[in-house]
Amino acid sequence: MSSCIRNLIVRLTLKSPSLYNRGVHGLVTEAGTEKIMDKSCAVYTLGTFNCSRSFCSTASLSEMEPNPSAKSTGKPSELVTKKLMDKEDEYVKTLFYGLMKRERGMLARAITLVESTNLKKREQARMLLSQVLQYNKGVMAHSMKAFNAFRIGLSGPPGAGKSTFIESFGKFLTAQGHKVAVLAVDPSSSTTGGSLLGDKTRMPELSCDMNAFIRPSPAKGSLGGVTRTTNEAIVLCEAAGYDIILIETVGVGQSEFAVSDMVDMFCLIIPPAGGDELQGIKKGIIEVADVVVVNKSDGDLVAAARRIQTEYVSALKYMRPRSRVWKPQVLRISSLTKEGIPDLWKTMQSFQHSMVDSGELVSKRNKQQETWMWNYIRDHIMECFITHGGVKNILPELTKQVRSGLITPGTAADKLLKEFAKES
Ligand SMILES: Nc1nc2c(ncn2[C@@H]2O[C@H](COP(=O)(O)OP(=O)(O)OP(=O)(O)O)[C@@H](O)[C@H]2O)c(=O)[nH]1
């Protein structure tokens, strides 16, 4: 029985000699039209395709035939830049198709590319990302969804049990057929020389799971740089078919706030302890939490976990709601016994539905795109600033003078900015 492929993104493998000889490279379907892309990146509208299967995300050309009544319009598309397909960008092309094929190794290499500071690689990363963003947008349009993946931010003080939680929660999700990516944001790794976040040894079972992808935090970088690359890694993971992205952060600097700016839902994980033990939690972070998870609610710790839950429930009552449709919840779980994890997932899904149905998720993501752009600009300007020859020459002396109180920080900043304004 043949059925028509409509409104879907389909990647073709280059198997059909006739189409291949005509230079046909792949097929992109877009909002009701089916398009075929040739090697020079011109995109031809070919009408509908017949397929022996109702849907497959990857289809070989042998399974498809162009509709004989359809005509090629021969119009080039602006969707795909010609540059991408040039020979020197073979690597970008390999990565893009590797992502489409959902190869974990290619995803890891693609993330390494976006993390690179090498100028040529940055250019390649930009090409890859524009292709991937276009692809993700197409997938969303065709599946009529407001998102490809559910992005969940996780934060909490050291020892709260984040990695134990990610291990249990991740396994719970993959058992339900989800594909889970774990990314980490840890700008402190630039000073400690290496990050433990996202370290696979902290999640031994999940790291062996074929439906999970764990990426440690980059070993160096400013918060701006790390969040930019994390934003980009999210987009790459989505293209590679991961439908749940967990972004873990340590409570260092402003990293939790940066993460809350790039996720759909922000989840604060705390241990059943108060006072000094909760010092790691920054003021204000509770205000951005959509759910507070009291972990370790097992054995002798259940009573303490209940007490903490009550405290947080009353604290949240006095906070100004950030959403019209969602009130932050406080749940108790045990990452060791896995008790409470199914209920937590239900709560997360209910959050997701409310946000999608109300349109809040779309506006949140739109706003996040803008924040991402500004972070990118800030990061780039800072990089230009500190690598500027003149600035580099006077920075150590001026810093010394500011520290010893000889000049005001404002005066030093003015001098540095004046130097920066000169040609390097
Ligand atoms: N009883 C109990 N202990 C737990 C639970 N979850 C984690 N732990 C323990 O808490 C300790 C810290 O757990 P981790 O998962 O390493 O905590 P973390 O937040 O990742 O810690 P950092 O790596 O320091 O950021 C370990 O000894 C865990 O075994 C839980 O649900 N119940």
Image (tube, rainbow, N blue to C red):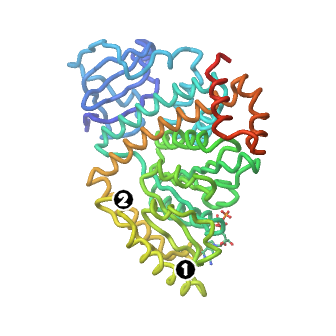
- Residue drawn at 55 percent across, 55 percent down: 256
- What kind of residue is marked 2? Arg
* Mark 1 burial class by Cα count in 10 Å: few <14, some 14-19, many 20+: many
Tell whether label 1 touches label 2 (CB within 8 Å): no
Residue pointed to by mark 1: 297
- Residue drawn at 60 percent across, 87 percent down: 300
Upstream in sequence: badge 2 or badge 1 = 1
- What kind of residue is marked 1? Ser
In the image: residue 132, left or right of residue 385: left
Residue 149, how many percent across, how many down?
42, 48
Residue 243, how many percent across, how many down?
44, 50
In terms of image quarters, where does ligand 1 lie?
bottom right
The CB of the residue at mark 1 lies under 8 Å from ligand 1: yes
Q: Nearer the viewer, residue 383 or 97?
A: 383
Residue 272, how many percent across, how many down?
57, 78
Residue 209, how many percent across, how many down?
59, 56
In the image: residue 202, left or right of residue 110: right
Residue pointed to by mark 2: 322
Q: Secondary structure at mark 1?
A: loop
Residue 407: name its quadrant. top right
Q: Secondary structure at mark 2?
A: loop
Q: Which of pointers 2 and 1 indicates the residue nearer the eye?
A: 2
